[in-house]
Amino acid sequence: MGQTSVTQFAGELKVQPSVLLEQLKAAGVHKQQAEDTLSEQDKTRLLEYLRKVHGATEGKSKITLTRKQTSEIKKSDSTGKARTIQVEVKKKRVFVKRDAAAEASPPEVPVVEEKQAPVVRPPAVDAQQLELREQEQKRQAELIARQSEELREKQEREKKLAEVRETEEKRVQQAPAKPAAEQAPPTDGTLHKPKVDEAAKGDKKSPKKKTTTIWKDETAKRRWVMTHQHLLDAGKIEKLVTKLRAISPDNPELAAAVRNEANYFEHHAKRMRYPQFRSQNLFVGSGVIEAGGKTVIGSRAKRSGMFWSVRGANAVIALRCCRHSRRFDDYWEHRRG
């Protein structure tokens, strides 16, 4: 068998080399330095000396080895939250030394005792954490209910708008076609200025009747839009609203739709000053705004399984706007200031 040094043997015994040298010297083994080698005979002499010192002259006939293993198990509780359970497994093994008198007898089977003692230590949840969880579940339920209500209202609006369009299309298709002479009065070379009757010129006392435009077909609609589109491009929203309110179609549903459009232009007139916006080098189309909302907001806040509070969504969107606008450092300098 190989020989070991005093330092190595001291490491196995978990003692200092100086202490081991003193014990070896007391046992009659003369070693001067920690690098000296030890034989099996030297180790035996040291063992006998230590047994005599501690009063154990007879060797042990039974050795007990105990082993403990600790592991963790992750399991979901009744609320669906993952919990960690610590499990301790203890194993005990006993070895019995055969004596000289029993050498002739059949070998004794070593007694093996295994003991498992799983210790379950579920993490404690205090009342404050339970209350916070209940509040969070309540907020999630309110958010889901609000989203469901908004979706239902949107679907109802779309359904009503589709019904109005379908009714108008059916009315236009069922309306009998009128002769060309009845559809529009003769003109003197323009699309909007009818020819004045000579007899009407002589009668100066007759009051002038205000004519209103009634959309009979899709051609008249497109012609009206092309005629008044310049008012929208020029930012003259008030004149456009006046033109819209002058329309009086026979169909009440179409009249309601025209009235809604006029109200929309009137309420959002300040957002349609396109010449002013162009002079400031701003975009006037919705494509850039929609793309920016999809890039900045949609890609971050509309992922699978996400639910946001108003305060949290506003905070995240503000930071992303600063980052994409390349003003992230300016934002923090402003906060420090």
Image (tube, rainbow, N blue to C red):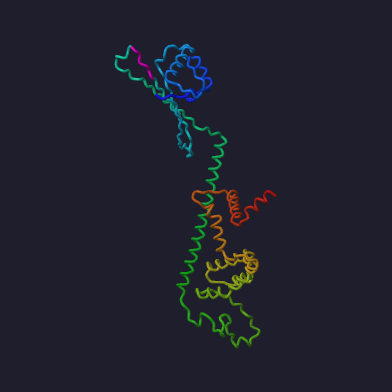
Question: In which quadrant of the rendered view does residue 263 lie?
Answer: bottom right
Using the image as rendered, state which of residue 144 and residue 167 is in the foreground. 144
Using the image as rendered, state which of residue 9 and residue 1 is in the foreground. 1
Write the residue at 50% across / 83% down: 181
Q: Is residue 209 above or below residue 101?
A: below
Question: In which quadrant of the rendered view does residue 61 lie?
Answer: top left
Q: Is residue 128 above or below residue 23?
A: below
Q: Is residue 197 above or below residue 261?
A: below
Residue 134 on image: x %, y %: 54, 40
Using the image as rendered, state which of residue 107 and residue 37 is in the foreground. 37
Q: Is residue 290 magenta?
A: no
Write the residue at 46% across / 76% down: 176
Write the residue at 50% across / 51% down: 303
Residue 97 on image: x %, y %: 37, 16
Q: Is residue 19 left or right of residue 107?
A: right
Using the image as rendered, state which of residue 109 and residue 17 is in the foreground. 17
Quadrant position of the N terminus in the picture: top left
Write the residue at 61% across / 79% down: 209
Which residues are drawn in magenta? 95-100
Residue 4 on image: x %, y %: 45, 24
Q: Is residue 97 magenta?
A: yes
Marks counted in the figure total 0
Q: Residue furthest right?
A: 337
Q: Is residue 291 left or right of residue 45?
A: right
Q: Is residue 263 above or below residue 140?
A: below
Residue 201 on image: x %, y %: 62, 87
